[in-house]
Amino acid sequence: MMYWNHHDMSGWDWFAMSTGSVLLWALLLTVAILFIRNLSHTSQRPDILAAPSPEQVLADRFARGEIDEEDYRNRLAVLRTDGSRLTEH
């Protein structure tokens, strides 16, 4: 009893076997591609760009020449205080 159907496969048997084989290979190929893509993308993820800090914005404005050194130092001092001077009014 080597073969269950004694070498007598109908057209539906061939269709089911062919479709199953194609679906199996498609599934294996998809899993392999997703696995490889996942491995390659973990080391190449771009860093999320955070909004610049207020001090960085101020430094950029100073570097572009929008404000002078005195104005830069005054504004930087205000940014670095804890805000207690601003709320004492």
Image (cartoon, grey):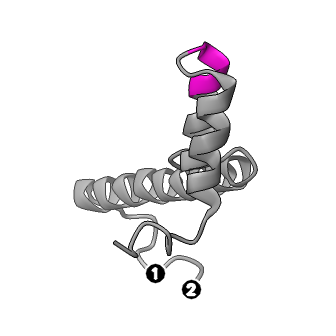
Q: Name the residue under label 2.
A: 1
Q: Which residue lies furthest to the right in this view?
A: 43
For mark 1, give the secondary structure. Answer: loop
Amino acid type assigned to the residue bearing label 2 in the image: Met
Seen in the picture, residue 14 relative to 58 is either above or below; the reply is below
Res. 73 in view: yes
Q: Position of residue 79 (x, y in %)?
A: 57, 55
Comparing 76 with 33, the one in front is 76
Q: What's the mark number on residue 42?
A: none
Q: Which residue lies furthest to the top in this view?
A: 65
Comparing 57 with 18, the one in front is 57
Q: How far apart are marks 1 and 2 (CA)?
A: 7 Å
Q: Mark 1 points at which residue?
A: 4
Q: Where is residue 52 in the image (x, y as percent from the top left)?
A: 55, 44
Q: What residue is drawn where x is 43% and y is 66%?
A: 86
What is the crowding at mark 1: few (fewer than 14 residues within 10 Å), some, or many (at least 20)? few
Q: In which quarter of the image is the C terminus?
A: bottom left
Comparing 74 with 15, the one in front is 74
For mark 2, give the secondary structure. Answer: loop
Q: Quadrant of the N terminus?
A: bottom right
Is residue 62 covered in magenta?
Answer: yes
Q: Which residue lies furthest to the front in this view?
A: 89
Point out the stretch of residues depicted in magenta: 61-65
Q: Position of residue 30 (x, y in %)?
A: 51, 52
Whether label 1 touches label 2, CB < 8 Å: yes
Q: Where is residue 9 in the image (x, y as percent from the top left)?
A: 35, 62
Res. 49 in view: no
Is residue 3 covered in magenta?
Answer: no
Seen in the picture, residue 23 relative to 63 is either above or below; the reply is below
Task: Please give left or right for residue 9 compared with residue 47 in the image.
Answer: left
What is the crowding at mark 2: few (fewer than 14 residues within 10 Å), some, or many (at least 20)? few
Amino acid type assigned to the residue bearing label 1 in the image: Trp
